[in-house]
Amino acid sequence: MRLRFVVLCSGVIASATLGASAPGYAAPQPAHSSSTPHSSAFFAGDWSSMGTVVTIVANRAMGPASRIIVKLPKNLQKSGQASFSLSRKSDDEWSGVQDNVTVSFKLISDNFGILSMVGDKPDHHFEMPLSRI
């Protein structure tokens, strides 16, 4: 009986010491860190949602002068304006206000973003998920 107790205790102690010396595993890191924002050129290109293509063009300026131009197709031109100039609001979010219409584009992942438009009229509001073509 004592032998079983000694064997059991030594097994518990051995497993506890082995578990304590095992290396810890770090939590997985996100795909892109918020400390390194994408340049405006990263957003450039055609983005699509249900057959509707939105074109984003970037300028070459860096820093606060950096802009992206969002060109809307006819069916999304609720305010009568075809393009909007957006400036960086945060690391992966761009926003601009023109003629009482606020347009913003938020990058969710490298190939997915949300375009939103809010105006002063009731029919001047939409949010559209966009995928890179």
Image (spheres, grey):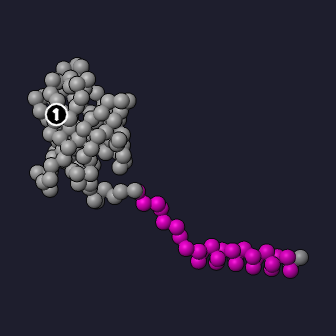
Q: Nearer the viewer, residue 39 or 132?
A: 132
Residue 110 x/y as whole percent = 35, 49
Residue 22 lies in the magenta-colored region: yes
Q: How would you classify the magenta stretch by its main secondary structure?
A: helix
Q: Quadrant of the C terminus?
A: top left
Residue 18 x/y as whole percent = 64, 77
Residue 83 lies in the magenta-colored region: no
User: In the picture provided, is 16 more to the left or to the right than 36?
Assistant: right
Q: Residue furthest right?
A: 1
- The range drawn in magenta is 3-30
Q: Residue furthest top?
A: 122
Location of mark 1 (residue): 83
The correct choice, above or below, for 131 with respect to 13 in the image is above
Q: Residue at x 80, y 79 (%)?
A: 6
Whether residue 64 can be seen here = no
Q: Quadrant of the N terminus?
A: bottom right
Q: Residue at x 53, y 70 (%)?
A: 24
Give the image quarter of residue 97. Answer: top left
Q: Residues within 10 Å of mark 1 (few under 14, many from 20)?
A: some
Q: Residue at x 64, y 77 (%)?
A: 17
Question: What amino acid type should be assigned to the residue bearing mark 1?
Answer: Ser
The correct choice, above or below, for 10 with respect to 123 in the image is below
Disc 1 is placed on an element classified as: strand
Residue 71 x/y as whole percent = 20, 35
Residue 76 x/y as whole percent = 25, 26
Give the total number of marks visible in the rendering: 1
